[in-house]
Amino acid sequence: MSDILVIKELHAGYGEGDILKGIDITLPAGRVVTIIGPNGSGKSTLLKTLAGLLLARRGDIVLKEQSLRDLSPPRRVRAGLSYVPQEYNIFRNLTVLENLKIAREFMADRKMRGGTAISDELIELFPELPGKFKARAGNLSGGQRQMLAFACALTVHPEVLMLDEPSAGLSPKYMTDIFDTVKKVNARGVSVLMVEQNAIEALRISDTCVVMANGHVRLTALANQVLEMKDLHSLYLGDAKEEAVAS
Amino acid sequence: MISFLILISTVVCFSAILALALNFQWGLGGMVNFGMAGLYALGTYSCALLMLKGGANTFFATLGAMAIVAAACGVIALVTLRVTEEDYFAIVTLGVGEMLRLVALNEDWLTKGALGLTGIPRPLGDVIAPEYYQYFLLGLSVALLAGTVWFLNVIARSPFGRIMRALREDDVVAATLGKHVLWARVRIFAIGGAIIGLAGSLHGFYYQYIDPTQFSNIVIAYAFMAVIAGGRGAHQGVIWGAAVVMVLLEGSRFMKDLIPVLDSDQLAAIRIIIIGIGLILLLVFRPQGFMREYRLQVNFK
Amino acid sequence: MLQTAFNGLVTGIIVTLPALAVTLLFGVLKFPNFAVGSMMTLAAYLVFALNVQLGWPLVISTAVVAVAFGGLLIAIDYVTFKPLRERGSITLMVASLGLGFVLENIARLAYGNTARSFAIELARPFRFLDIRMNREQMITIVVSTLAMLAMYFLLTRMPIGRAMRAVADNPALALVRGIESPRIIRWTWFIAGMLLAVGGVLIGMDRALEPPMGSSYLVAVFAAAILGGLGSPLGAFIGALVIGIVSELATLVIPPNYRIGIPLCVIALILIFRPQGLFGQPYIRK
């Protein structure tokens, strides 16, 4: 099987010092990879660097044989990498429909610019949204916002979808919905790279689990193997303690 | 020539004091004063009017002017207490400056409007013979400049100054102290205001005649240029910056002799265009960037 | 009273176009641009050159200058603000101040300090519902309303307008949604340039062409934009009307020379009681 996204020896950070100290992760086509790890381990920073919001200082990011390293964030989207940030992931002053339209309008591909952003497929995945099209996105509930952000990222038909803690701050109902949706999206052929705190829920729908701590990859394993570990919690909480002692 | 050098050195002194005030408000308090011109006018007019209408002597008039500008600055900082966004602060100071200049222009009964005030008394003006007066005024200006630098250094090294620096560099500390930060901002802005008042008083002593046109927004450009050209926010740098800017400006008055076809309005316009372009060029080509420069550098010995 | 309110409405309407330009520029570029006043002045003098010196009709002169001025602002941005983009809003504000000096004094250098006016024949004021209005006021109302409708259409119905709102709302998200911000910035300058050019002509018609004509509106323009919540186009429109009417009514009580004090007080009150403006949302910086 081919790898759709390959992250090689990636270094990145803010100011002096790196937060990511050489990350190697591969995402096989059509799979779900979930990254878990304690706070401050660099998970969100990794996604930001992949999306292009933060400059990679060393290493490379390769999507379908194409290096993304020197591409601007919009070009990475066009290359097929779509990203849902954890917070501020919708345009609050735009309506739901405007949010959904906006990404496609600026795709270089003319074919994609035409047609409707709101495919039947999208409505099937997010049945709650059509009723809210005219609403200001900022007035949606937390769960609806997350769904909207998710849907926006899909309007550009990405090859790889990156989700930063999609279940953060959601009610249990929405949490289940979100993970179900991730599963459905994946079933339609989109590869998913996800950062999650709710490790158990996330790993149930994942193929591979990557554990990050302190800017390094500590472990890469099959998701169901990790799920079978009895001391799953101690796996990443343990690292957190270790770091607290170390720092 | 000597006489010209002495006059220009005096101008450099009070311009440097003004630039130091900006450097202090901006560097230590993070508050950018775009109302410089109006506040400077407030200082000059207050000092002159306290003498001409209030009958105060030069010393108390200067103190009064410093207190008045300090109070005005304090009010500005108070009104904007809840707004830590520098954008809004800049707009408010710009508006206040504009308003103050309008008062100077329109309140004929007080400021004689566009005619301006004449016959402003000078410190010890009736004791010192006129031919020596320019030397005395230069000495006084140098002394006050030195005093200002000394005073600002004392503040920067005081516990208050150290707290302010810590606040500026550490958001967590700032968030923890909350209200104290806001009051500190008021105090810094007011102290800066007092220094503007001092510079304004010297301006009046030097020219002995003031009118609203002396306080156009171009004053802000001078002050900013001095601070930026001086770089790094160090006091000496700002003084050198002010010196370079003022010498160039005063020197450019001789352009008139070089290009006789232009009338005085056009020459004034060309000078301001050059200042504006110079300001932008300084900003673009200062490789250190702006954020570093404005930090107040203090050497602990 | 009614007459004063009407005059205030017209004053407010004059402020709407520059206030909208300010709010768009602030939304997309995240700094208050102090050069907008001088930009209006320069644009008005360019129209003067075509209208009076070349004898073109005012409407055509304005249209030509509006488009050219939009282009000019893109060029100006390229040499002044673009190199400073990453340096924080204070640097950009200071640069805009310097730019303002340059633009205003280019107009002064070319045309001096004498007041001038456009070549339009005088028309007799007429009365409507007991309100005396002149043709310039009518033109101001009609032109501004049309421009506002066009802006509304642009911002809500056209991809580029939506993208401008998106960048104003959340610049980082706009990037990861595939919106090329340099392109949006160019469009924003272009549209702001057109608004400022038309605004400058309206001011020149209302009073006279003088080098400080634009900057004298600066505080009122910013008050309107802040009242509406910086970055909110609809807010800027309503803010401008409120500021205009309130300042004009206030001249019944205070000397007209201090009209500028009213917007200033409005800014102060907003900052004390409702820092996000009447319609604004607290915005996110990068």
Image (spheres, coloured by chain):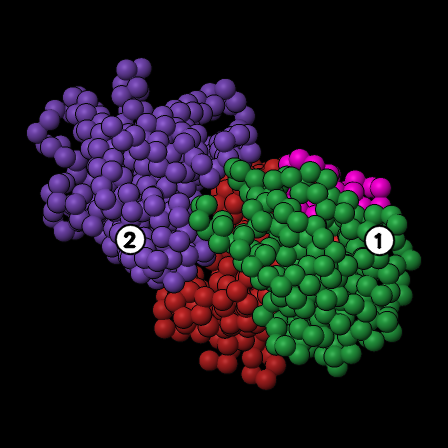
The residue under label 2 is: B184
Judged from the image, the secondary structure of the residue bearing numbered disc 2 is: helix
Name the amino acid type tagged 2. Answer: Ala
The purple-tinted chain is B
Residue B216 image-quadrant placement: top left
Q: Position of residue A91 (x, y in %)?
A: 66, 65
Picture residue at 81% right of the left edge, 66% below the top: A185
Residue C123 located within the stretch drawn in magenta: no
Q: Position of residue B241 (x, y in %)?
A: 39, 28
Picture residue at 22% right of the left edge, 33% below the top: B150
Vertical arrangement, residue A47 with respect to residue A182, above or below: above
| Circle nearer the viewer, 1 or 2 | 1
| Chain letter for mark 1 | A
Q: Is the residue under label 2 in contact with that under label 1 (CB below 8 Å)? A: no
Name the amino acid type tagged 1. Answer: Ala
Q: From this viewpoint, is residue A70 visible?
A: yes
Specify whether B178 is left or right of A105.
left
Vertical arrangement, residue B176 with respect to residue A69, above or below: below
Q: From this viewpoint, is residue C7 visible?
A: no
Q: Magenta residues?
A: A46-70
Marks 1 and 2 on same chain: no
Vertical arrangement, residue C253 with respect to residue C122, above or below: below
Colour chain C is painted in: red
The green-tinted chain is A
| Chain letter for mark 2 | B
Q: Nearer the viewer, residue C161 or A141?
A: A141
Picture residue at 30% right of the left edge, 30% below the top: B299
Q: Position of residue C30 (x, y in %)?
A: 57, 53
